Image (cartoon, rainbow, N blue to C red):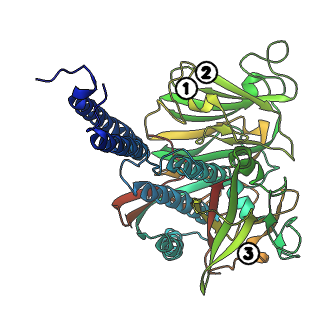
């Protein structure tokens, strides 16, 4: 049954069906929008996880003393951390085995494909300064940071290359100055981990 | 009335209903998916946004100022209560200004200030090659009487020689009618050999007031690798020791559990072990068994701070938090 007067209506019908279909597909795509929680390397979940892991690693290292040993793993003769990478005073890439925090860092970050920078902030009379401890690159936009405050005393000792205790802080040179020679407190350190998924 | 099905001529209404149903389905789907996203979003948030930092820094302060109190107590040049308090206040002020700067950089204002301190005494021996007898070489002696609380009890033993006799084991007792005791011996509860201890092992045994006994076995110490017993922390050589923190039926237990205060602290068979020790007590009386000033070769008792109270206030964009902190490192529940 051919009706030659309905051509125009059929065309319009076809066009509107196409529009509805396209709108439906567009809407369906909108429904599953990319939110900060959508799975990707920059997901909020991943960030929260790395943040909590970093906090936990710092806390446990502070508890067993490895954190304090790490900031004191200093070679005053060469003015750098023991076994530092060439041309810099810190570690580029993975820190050497002797570094007191290396095992914690490796288990927490390296094994999970997370890159990190380790910084130590300390105080001087001029204000707060920062020294790099471990450098693994420039943090990406979704990097997270965790930090921990550490009190160090004059009676604490530098840590030697082989992990034994060396000279007392009161009598040796560290990158951070003695804030007040009248008090036993030497300086206040803030160890910061900046970590990101690679 | 048009038919819902039929030939091409009457398909308009069917198409319309179909499209409406489809549209409604998509809207429902959007709601479902979005509520899932929202639930996930909520699940990853903190209970109170921003509170984590406030509580975290509070814990860091308690740890840091705890170390300050320990260091000041151990400083042999700081002898009187007023000096102890002055140094503590000065160092807390340093932590407040320097730590405050770092917190300000991360967007928070922190106020921490000294409120008061409870005086106490520190009993210690620093001569690692001496045995644990009193200053007159008496083997069984009382360190302190009428103690209301004790914290940070630690031993570092270089030598344990009980000569094959469990009853010669070095013993620390906390007693007031009932007795809690810690002993270190070359022979454990099960004796030596066969199923007992090896020749190069020592046992740390705890007997509670109710007669419950438990032991941890560790390598025998020597001059280069001492046996470090953190009695209040519940560790031996840095590893948790179950005998120090729970009974056989897994009830939590700690130094002096089940012994009412005030109690006496005694050492028995002090001649069986060599090494150092330290503890801080509150409200105790001492006799001539200890030197009353710092002594580098024999046991002594010195003024110390038992605890320090601080007020703490933390404020950032999301949360204002205030609390009073009590710093008493290595304290066990009363």
* Image mark 2: chain: B
Give the answer, above or below, for where B186 lies relative to B82. Answer: above
Separation (CA) of disc 3 from disc 2? 45 Å
Indicate the quadrant where residue B69 lies: bottom right
Determine whether, in the image, residue A50 is placed left or right of residue B189: left
Q: Tags 1 and 2 in contact by the CB under 8 Å rule?
A: yes
SS of the residue under disc 1? loop
Q: Position of residue B63 (x, y in %)?
A: 55, 57
Q: Position of residue B96 (x, y in %)?
A: 48, 72
Determine whether, in the image, residue B279 is placed left or right of residue A170: left
Mark number displayed over residue A170: 3
Nearer to the camera, B283 or A113: A113
Question: Residue most toward the left?
Answer: B1
Q: Position of residue B133 (x, y in %)?
A: 72, 44
- From the image, tell me which residue sits under label 1: B208
Q: Tags 3 and 2 in contact by the CB under 8 Å rule?
A: no
Tell me what residue is drawn at x 74 percent, y 72 percent: A169
Mark number displayed over residue B270: none
Tell me what residue is drawn at x 35 percent, y 58 percent: B323
Same chain for labels 3 and 1? Say yes or no.
Answer: no
Separation (CA) of disc 1 from disc 2? 7 Å
Tell me what residue is drawn at x 61 percent, y 60 percent: B292
- From the image, tell me which residue sits under label 2: B213
């Amino acid at each position: 049954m051919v009706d030659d007067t309905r051509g125009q209506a059929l065309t319009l019908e076809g066009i509107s069906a196409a529009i509805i279909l396209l709108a439906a597909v567009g809407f369906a795509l909108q429904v599953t929008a990319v939110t900060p929680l959508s799975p990707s390397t920059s997901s909020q979940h991943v960030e929260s996880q790395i943040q909590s892991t970093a906090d936990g690693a710092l806390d446990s290292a502070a508890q067993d003393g490895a954190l304090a040993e790490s900031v004191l793993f200093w070679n005053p003769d060469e003015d750098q951390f023991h076994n530092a990478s060439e041309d810099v005073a810190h570690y580029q890439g993975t820190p050497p085995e002797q570094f007191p925090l290396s095992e914690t860092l490796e288990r927490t970050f390296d094994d999970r494909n997370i890159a990190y920078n380790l910084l130590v902030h300390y105080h001087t009379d001029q204000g707060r300064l920062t020294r790099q401890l471990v450098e693994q690159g420039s943090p990406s936009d979704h990097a997270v940071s965790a930090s921990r405050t550490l009190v160090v005393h004059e009676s604490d000792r530098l840590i030697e290359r082989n992990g034994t205790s060396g000279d007392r802080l009161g009598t040796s040179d560290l990158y951070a100055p003695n804030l007040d020679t009248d008090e036993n407190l030497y300086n206040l350190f803030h160890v910061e981990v900046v970590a990101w998924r690679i | 009335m048009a038919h819902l099905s039929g030939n091409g001529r009457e398909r308009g209404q069917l198409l319309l209903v179909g499209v409406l149903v489809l549209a409604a389905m998509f809207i429902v789907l959007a709601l479902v998916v979005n509520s899932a996203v929202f639930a996930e979003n909520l699940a990853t948030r903190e209970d109170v946004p921003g509170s984590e930092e406030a509580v975290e820094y509070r814990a860091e302060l308690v740890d840091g100022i705890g170390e300050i109190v320990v260091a000041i107590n151990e400083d042999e040049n700081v002898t009187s209560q007023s000096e102890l308090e002055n140094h503590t206040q000065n160092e807390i002020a340093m932590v407040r200004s320097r730590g405050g700067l770092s917190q300000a950089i991360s967007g928070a204002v922190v106020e921490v200030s000294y409120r008061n301190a409870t005086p106490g005494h520190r009993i210690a021996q620093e001569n690692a090659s001496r045995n644990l007898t009193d200053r007159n070489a008496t083997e069984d002696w009382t360190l302190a009487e009428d103690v209301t609380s004790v914290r940070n009890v630690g031993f570092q033993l270089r030598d344990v020689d009980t000569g094959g006799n469990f009853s010669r084991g070095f013993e620390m007792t906390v007693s007031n009618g009932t007795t809690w005791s810690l002993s270190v011996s070359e022979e454990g509860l099960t004796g030596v050999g066969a199923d007992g201890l090896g020749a190069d092992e020592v046992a740390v045994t705890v007997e509670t007031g109710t007669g419950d006994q438990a032991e941890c076995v560790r390598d025998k110490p020597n001059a280069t690798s001492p046996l470090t017993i953190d009695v209040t922390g519940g560790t031996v050589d840095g590893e948790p020791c179950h005998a120090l923190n729970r009974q056989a039926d897994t009830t939590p237990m700690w130094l002096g559990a089940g012994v009412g205060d005030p109690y006496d602290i005694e050492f028995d068979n002090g001649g069986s072990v060599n090494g150092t020790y330290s503890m801080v007590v509150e409200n105790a009386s001492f006799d001539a068994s200890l030197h009353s000033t710092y002594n580098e070769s024999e046991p002594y008792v010195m003024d110390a701070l038992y605890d320090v109270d601080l007020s703490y206030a933390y404020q950032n964009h999301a949360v204002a938090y205030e609390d009073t902190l009590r710093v008493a490192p290595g304290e066990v529940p009363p």
